[in-house]
Image: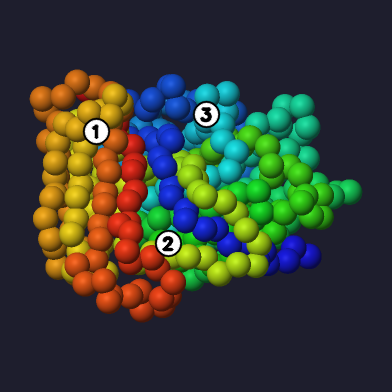
């Protein structure tokens, strides 16, 4: 059995390193390729995966993966399975997607990852991380890790969820643990520190997969109540890497109650929004810089009351490229303290920098 990890992160900041916001009229071939074919995919699935726009397309800022009931290449259903294999691979980080799942008997959407070395090592030796899986009409989301330890091993958990609504599904993955989140709330954790229980697979690069299966050994087959066509909606997929001052075991983290969100949309053209939260009245600075470190816009430079804020940037006058936004906040009253942790260093400002991408 995998033990819950006691590793804590200190002074962590997530930096966006890759994303697809699905804002263009076509699916980016620099980000995604397709698995093609039928044959059950090892799970007795009933669909034939295609690369047709009838099964995978973009619309109104979403990726749509569409399962259809139709005769195609000897199968009774079609769908799509997109992957970043050979294009985008990641070791550790925060992997996140905002998704609205279809709900129906025999329907099996998934947001997951496989080891880059699957062609050499096969499964389960390559490792698998299931960030989101949902079957049938269940009101739960499943998160699971699969690996090899003298045979197939798995460890995972589930959390209650109204799957008919958009939710954010994510993992935070580092050298010590994989942690599963639903809408920012952790519900499961697996220890992979020091390759415990032969979990060395999870310290190598992985690629991302999005698919909508029809039928299979787990959900069973569709029936007369299953709606077709049925659609998996994906608002975005984002990958962050952790910038940190260090990882220490069994220490209480020094936390800070401020929060800065990744701009949305990102990439963007030409408008984007940056949101942040102030736990108490603070002097705030929010500025945009180019890659040369030159300030090109100041969105905030004032004292603000406690609360949540959103600031908009119109970059219509700027060329395409990578930019950075730097957020700084210092409590106006140095007596203020975090309600949960009085170890916060109030004499120093909270400072965080994140990347944003302008694509024309």
What's the residue at 38%, 35% (across, down)?
20
Q: Earlier in the sequence, mark 3 or mark 1?
A: 3
Residue at the far front: name it. Answer: 347
Please provide percent x and percent y for residue 133.
54, 54
Q: Nearer the viewer, residue 126 or 15?
A: 15
Q: Earlier in the sequence, mark 1 or mark 2?
A: 2
Label 1, residues with CA under 10 Å away: few <14, some 14-19, many ≥20: some
The answer to whether residue 259 is seen in the rendering is no
Would you identify the image quadrant in which residue 30 lies? top left
What's the residue at 42%, 42% (across, down)?
15
**CA gap, disc 1 and disc 2:** 29 Å
What's the residue at 19%, 50% (across, down)?
285
Describe the element under mark 2 as helix, strand or loop: loop
Label 2, residues with CA under 10 Å away: few <14, some 14-19, many ≥20: few
Please provide percent x and percent y for residue 128.
66, 45
Would you identify the image quadrant in which residue 235 lies? top left
Quadrant of the rendering where the C terminus is positioned: top left
Residue at the far right: name it. Answer: 150
Residue holding disc 2: 184
What's the residue at 22%, 28% (across, down)?
294
Residue holding disc 3: 88
Describe the element under mark 1 as helix, strand or loop: strand
Q: Nearer the viewer, residue 290 or 136?
A: 290
Describe the element under mark 3 as helix, strand or loop: loop
**CA gap, disc 3 and disc 2:** 24 Å
Residue holding disc 1: 289
Looking at the image, residue 144 sits to the left or right of residue 171; the answer is right
């Amino acid at each position: 059995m995998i033990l819950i990890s006691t590793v804590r992160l200190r002074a962590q900041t997530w930096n966006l390193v890759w994303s697809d916001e699905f804002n263009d009229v076509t699916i980016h071939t620099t980000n995604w390729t397709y698995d093609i074919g039928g044959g059950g995919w090892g799970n007795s699935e009933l669909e034939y995966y295609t690369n047709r726009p009838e099964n995978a397309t973009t619309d109104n800022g979403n990726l749509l993966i569409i399962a259809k009931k139709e005769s195609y290449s000897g199968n009774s259903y079609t769908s799509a399975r997109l992957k970043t294999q050979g294009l985008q691979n990641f070791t550790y980080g925060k992997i996140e997607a905002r998704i609205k799942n279809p709900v129906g008997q025999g329907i099996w959407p998934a947001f997951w990852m496989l080891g880059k070395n699957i062609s050499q090592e096969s499964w389960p030796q390559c490792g698998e991380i299931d960030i989101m899986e949902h079957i049938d009409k269940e009101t739960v989301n499943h998160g699971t890790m699969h690996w090899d330890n003298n045979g197939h091993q798995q460890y995972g958990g589930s959390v209650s969820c109204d799957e008919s609504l958009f939710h954010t599904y994510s993992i935070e993955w580092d050298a010590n643990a994989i942690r599963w989140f639903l809408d920012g709330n952790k519900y499961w954790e697996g220890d992979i520190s020091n390759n415990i229980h032969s979990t060395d697979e999870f310290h190598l690069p992985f690629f991302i997969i999005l698919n909508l299966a029809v039928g299979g050994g787990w959900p069973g087959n569709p029936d007369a109540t299953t709606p077709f066509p049925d659609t998996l909606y994906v608002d975005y997929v984002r990958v962050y890497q952790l910038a940190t001052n260090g990882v220490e075991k069994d220490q209480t983290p020094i936390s800070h109650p401020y929060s800065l969100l990744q701009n949305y949309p990102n990439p963007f053209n030409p408008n984007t929004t940056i949101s942040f939260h102030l736990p108490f009245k603070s002097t705030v600075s929010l500025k945009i810089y180019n890659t040369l470190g030159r300030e090109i816009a100041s969105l905030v430079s004032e004292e603000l009351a406690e609360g949540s804020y959103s600031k908009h940037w119109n970059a219509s006058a700027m060329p395409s490229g990578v930019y950075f936004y730097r957020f700084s906040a210092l409590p106006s009253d140095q007596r203020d303290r975090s309600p949960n942790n009085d170890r916060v260093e109030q004499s120093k400002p909270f400072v965080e920098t994140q990347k944003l991408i302008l694509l024309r």
